[in-house]
Amino acid sequence: MATTTLSAEKDPMGAAISDYFNHHRADRLRVFSSQFEEDEIPVKELFRSIQSMPILERTALQMATGRILDVGAGSGCHALALQEMGKEVCAIDISPLSVEVMQQRGVNDPRLINLFDETFTETFNTILMLMNGSGIIGRLNNMPGFFQRMKRILRPGGCILMDLAGDYYGEIDFQMQYKDVKGDTFDWLYIDFQTLSLYASECGFKAELVKEGKHYDYLVKLSIA
Ligand code: SAH
């Protein structure tokens, strides 16, 4: 598992977020994968307001309590919504351009850091991983390492809230491009509830299905068993 952050020259999503924030419009954020046809991420959706968030995300925001860690916070849409609700949140991302935008948008505690960087030793009551949160785990064989890391930064009684959306589950390789900024290829894991529960229990966690959507999407709560 990589533990570093991106350089601005290889941060296409951050470039798109920065462009949209500064010019209220953006080019196409292109997504390539050896397993799929070329796709794109609508940049505007990375700036969604609480009203336009899917129900699974809104449920997670409601459930989040105490000191919250927003993992892979992007433009800061969830961190800002949590702040409006009066909650305390630290927002981390490996994208330097995204972290800069979060700062400019008024996210109170944005940090340029990788979730798996062991020098980050602060602890949290709720760890939020939203918009296909398991993606950051990358591959199935990173699961034990992920849960070990969570044990270090979860406070007693705390939990991880993760939403998954998609009609495909598996290990995907992705690469993104925005204008002439091309990122490195990275692994992204889409995991179904059954498989996640199995890994969780092997690693001393329990997985609870909080809510299910209509299209194989779900919100899961992971806590130390
Ligand atoms: N949560 C945001 C953005 C999701 S995109 C939203 O819902 O709109 C996933 C984000 O995770 C990207 O901004 C990416 O830079 C970040 N990311 C990927 N791997 C990470 C890691 N290991 N640690 C922290 N952030 C990571």
Image (tube, helix red, strand yellow):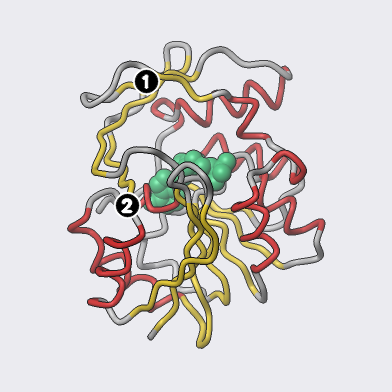
185 sits to left or right of 43: left
Any atom of ligand 1 within 8 Å of the CB at mark 2?
no
Q: Nearer the viewer, residue 43 or 18?
A: 43
- Residue positioned 72% across, 38% down in the render: 52
Extreme residue in the left direction:
141
Query: Could you say which is closer to the camera, residue 138 or residue 104?
Result: 138
Sort mark 1 into few (<14), some (14-19) or many (20+) by Cα contacts within 10 Å. Answer: some
Residue placed under numbered mark 1 in the picture: 182
**Rendered location of residue 98, percent (x, y):** 57, 38
Q: Tell me: residue 150, above or below residue 84.
A: below
Q: Quadrant of the C terminus?
A: bottom left
Residue at x-position 45% and y-position 49%? 164
> Which residue was labeled with disc 2?
191
Which amino acid is tagged 1?
Lys
| 6 versus 71 height, above or below | above
Q: In the image, is 70 to the left or to the right of 33?
A: right
